[in-house]
Image (cartoon, rainbow, N blue to C red):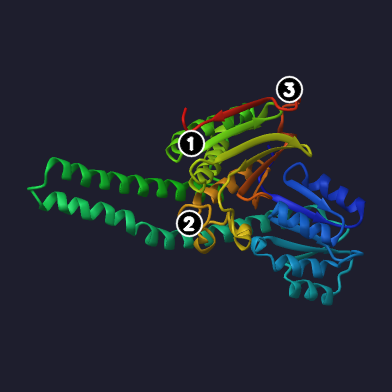
Amino acid sequence: MKAQYRILAVDDTPVNLRILEKLLGTEYNLKTAAAGEEAIRTAVEFRPDLILLDIMMPDMDGYEVCRQIRAIRELLHTKIIMVSAKTMTGERLMGYEAGANDYITTPYDKDELLAKVRIFLQLKSSEEVDQLVTRLLNLLCHETRTPLNGLLTPAEMLMEDEDLSREQQKTLAGLIYNSTKRLHKFIESVMLLSDLKYGKREMNCAPVDPHHIIHQAVREVSPKARQRDVDIEVKLHDRLHMTLDSEELIGVMVSLLDNAVRFSPSGSRITVEMAIQNEKVRIRVTDQGSGIAPENLPHIFDEFSRNHMEQHTDGFGLSLAIAREIVKRHNGHIWAENGSEGGAVFLMEIPLSDAFESNKMIRSEIDAISIYTASS
């Protein structure tokens, strides 16, 4: 599997894109666009770490593309290198004013291009990690107060009051246990997100059928679904084997399903579907809850944005932020939308390019339907 760094190359000259594909395509996850509007759409979906942006294009020049990308919150840390055959100082200044980080001339000097790409990818990672550390420290100070109070107060009562009954002691011990469990889970999530951002966590990829990932996640969430009287229906269309980190992706599916269960009304149903679309494995989780406010949809996977996380998240949205990082490591894409008939829809896509070529995909209308009912 290629490195997780993502590069978007934008140029209306096919030969230039082929050169970049040859220079960068084997080491990085590279996508291309041939026009300004296409570049902006691709950038929003692909979320590149670096954009190599041609200045002279017919529909929209590189300066305007750069300005519009800089206005997109999700691409705040994306590095942009402007590309042009011209070397005029005025053009460089216009690029910097539009929000570009650097400028490179064509024809490319291979060593210069590769060096700048490496430097700006490292710089982007460093900036994101610095911001993450700052926000994590602030979050730790804020978020640990409640569980710590849940530890200290019951512990003080146990120590100071010798006349507590056995039942009262058990109640206080339960409060201490629950607070400890919450604090432990929070710290584990913080460390995992930090490791994913730093690139410290190794992937453990092996051949796996995505059906196994889905069913394992559903089995883990089923007890909570039964408690809330929520059914889970699984519709799986195609079978194949892929090189995936199954443990990580089971965690992603558990997060999506747990989220769906939490916001589903009693007596409702969650639907999980998997199929092959546009050379990608697409997994879709649909609930029958109240849906997500449209203004919150772009931020649903952002870590720590509590104002945007009141719907379909727990606390500061760490589980969904972790899910996005894991899917990104698999060269995939994850997003949320509202269903046409109500409820929230979470979708995940992973490209089939990571499937084992030696395994044939078995296509069928519906391979299997499984229903995990609240009464079972």
How far from the left and from the top, in percent, is residue 40? Answer: 77, 60
As drawn, which residue projects farthest toward the left?
A: 163
Residue placed under numbered mark 2 in the picture = 316
Would you place residue 145 above or below residue 284 in this image? below
Left or right for 85, reference 259: right
- Residue assigned mark 3: 359
Looking at the figure, which quarter contains the N terminus?
Answer: top right
Give the label, 1 or 2, closer to the camera. Answer: 1
Residue 140 in picture, x, y percent from top left = 40, 58
- How far is mark 3 from mark 1, CA to CA? 30 Å
Q: Which residue is mark 1?
A: 221
**Residue at position x 92%, y 64% in the image:** 58
> Of helix, strand and loop, which one carries label 2?
loop
The x and y percentages for residue 4 are: 66, 45
Q: Nearer the viewer, residue 308 or 244?
A: 308
Q: Is residue 316 above or below residue 219?
A: below
Q: How many other residues sit within 10 Å of disc 2, few (<14), some (14-19) or many (≥20)? A: many
> Which numbered disc flags the more N-terminal residue, 3 or 2?
2
Q: Residues within 10 Å of mark 3 (few under 14, many from 20)?
A: few
Cα gap from disc 3 to disc 2, whole angstroms: 40 Å
Q: Which is more toward the observer, 45 or 291? A: 291
Q: Is residue 316 left or right of residue 238?
A: left
Q: Amino acid at mark 1?
A: Val
Q: Quadrant of residue 287?
A: top right
Q: Is residue 198 visible?
A: no
User: Are the residues at dot 3 and dot 1 in contact (C-beta closer than 8 Å)?
Assistant: no
| Residue 359 visible within the image | yes
Instruction: Kindly identify the amino acid type of the residue bearing the numbered disc 2.
Output: Phe
Residue 193 at x, y percent in the picture: 51, 49
